[in-house]
Image (cartoon, helix red, strand yellow):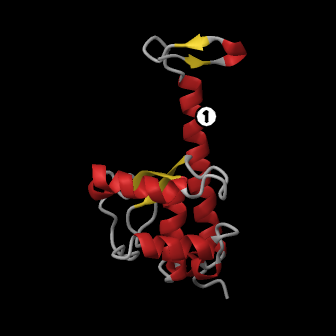
Amino acid sequence: MSLVGPAGAQLNPDEAENFEDIEKQFAVKVVQHMETYWNILEHIPGSKLRLTKIDDEIYEHFKKEFPDFDASATINEDEMKSKEGKERWRNFINQYEKKVEDFNFGTMLRASPKTEYDQDNTIFAVRMQFYAIEIARNREGLNDWIYEKANAGKK
């Protein structure tokens, strides 16, 4: 199998070198997204925040497709990334291809809504997984503590 690269050049994935600069740029974007989201949660209670123009649709669809998902619980990454989990998520995510920009980009997701982003509480996820889970957490008030903590004693 070969891929077409810049200027129509054929790229063979087995022979392609590691595009280190692209990986670094990707990592920078992921960290910027994570920091931006956290900064927003420090300034606006999650329960008052909208992440997309179609939050209501995403939330309803997420609750329908994942009725047993407990937004307050710690995500079981192994279950989420199991063969069955990947298939369920793929079916969910692909419905947003033409509705949500960057729907399938990689991003970071907190495993638990009760803690900050850190090495032990961060999962690599697809943007639509982030949106679905964070919209649920915000709707259920599970991220409001971030705003409250950031603004304690500022009155």
The image shows residue 39 at horizontal and vertical percentages of: 63, 64
Question: Image quadrant of residue 56?
Answer: bottom right
The image shows residue 47 at horizontal and vertical percentages of: 58, 82
| 18 relative to 57 in the view: left or right | left
Density class for disc 1 (Cα within 10 Å; few <14, some 14-19, many ≥20) is few
Query: Callout 1, which amino acid?
Result: Gln
Residue occupied by mark 1: 25
Figure label count? 1
Tell me if residue 81 can be seen: yes
Question: Image quadrant of residue 155?
Answer: bottom right
Q: Is residue 100 above or below residue 19?
A: below
Q: Is residue 66 above or below residue 23?
A: below
Task: Residue at 28%, 58% (x, y): give it.
Answer: 79
Disc 1 element: helix
The image shows residue 73 at horizontal and vertical percentages of: 33, 73
| 68 relative to 35 in the view: left or right | left
Q: Is residue 145 above or below residue 19?
A: below
Task: Residue at 50%, 13% (x, y): give it.
Answer: 12
